[in-house]
Image: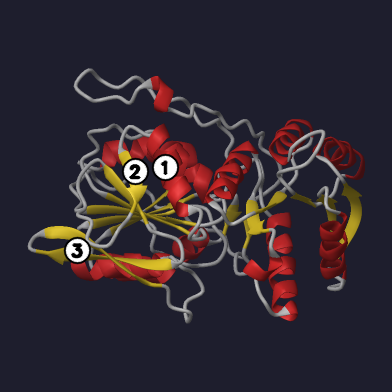
Amino acid sequence: MTVSVLVVDDSGFFRKRLTEILTASGQIKVVGAATNGREGVELAEKLRPDVITMDYEMPVMDGISAVREIMRKHPTPVLMFSSLTYEGARVTLDALEAGAVDFLPKNFEEIARDTSQLQKILIQRILDVAGSRPGARSAPVAPRPAAPAAEPRREPSERAGSRLHRPVTTEPRRDPAASEPVRKPARKTAARHYSVVAIGTSTGGPVALQKVLTALPASFPAPIVLVQHMPASFTPAFAERLNKLCRIEVRQAEDGDVLRPGLALLAPGGKQMMIESRGGQAKVRILPGDDRLNYKPCVDVTFGSLARSFPGKTLGLILTGMGSDGKEGCRMMKQSGSVIWSQDEKSSVIYGMPMAVAKAGLSDEILALEDIGARLVEGVS
């Protein structure tokens, strides 16, 4: 089956280059090209492509505004092209919240220097995005509830109170191994104390993490570690964004950080994060990214370190994402006596990582995205 693509970019050279790469595969057909966001919105409505690639800086209408219009009129999976800079990260995160599914660097040399490898990555990303579910997060990201008087609150000026408006549309992307249905565990796990709560995610993760973490009170009783597949230039901006939105503190992890309740540490892009127990404290180790591993940061690496350092004392949670990163780490945690939760298929943008965990029989609970925040508050003591 051929995937139809609409290319939206004001650069004629980029439109031509991207079209050549995608059409060479035989799996993808570029059905149209637009030079600005407004034209992109109009062609999306007219052509109804399977995927739209979108630049963010264009005349007439920018890419983020175009994504919002497309999601309002006819939700379609959107792949953003952006620069790997701090400002590019901030714009890309806005685009993801507006409805885009995923992103890639616009400078192709930052994806791969070898042409054949570049083509392989671009084509696979388009195919993955084509099967995603752009409206999987059926409820908007709600504003933070008023905190109890005993809890500190951030000033309103520090909050980025934007909402996510995305209607439910097609079925989420499932990996090829998903031929068998996933059985949900019959009951909830009992509330208990955890030394660490660990969350791993990939495609669809930035908005999913925002929804989960904004539901937590400043007094949340456990430390949190976050592993999101994301480039090194993006994780500082993402941590900053979450910190402005959440009542808990969120920041990018640094080597030697000590975990504590009410603090969420985000693994830095391009590196690996491990958690060690030293003198009764949970401390962060940041290591160089290993080229032998597909993901930097890698969920399996962080979760595996928690299984060794805090056996039976960790809650692991796998959210939306392509592939199966996290499955082996969850297996190690489960074997040590820890608890594993995973996101359900309906609310996942791409049902890969959580499906791999659930199908392996590792999930103690399978939860809809909109329920996870409240369940953490209820289940972590």
Q: Secondary structure at mark 1?
A: helix
The residue singled out by tag 2 in the image is: 250
Query: In the rendered structure, which disc, 2 or 3, sits on the residue that comes first in sequence?
Result: 2
The residue singled out by tag 1 in the image is: 240
Taking the spot 75% from the left edge, 44% from the top edge, the residue there is 76
Of 199 and 278, nearer the camera is 278
**For the image shown, how many numbered marks are present on the structure?**
3
The C terminus lies in quadrant: top left
**Amino acid, disc 2:** Val
Of 144 and 351, nearer the camera is 144
Q: Is residue 381 above or below residue 115?
A: above
The residue singled out by tag 3 in the image is: 310
Residue 10 in view here: yes
The N terminus lies in quadrant: bottom right
Q: Is residue 221 above or below residue 268?
A: above
Badge 1 vs badge 3, beta-carbon distance below 8 Å: no
Taking the spot 38% from the left edge, 68% from the top edge, the residue there is 272
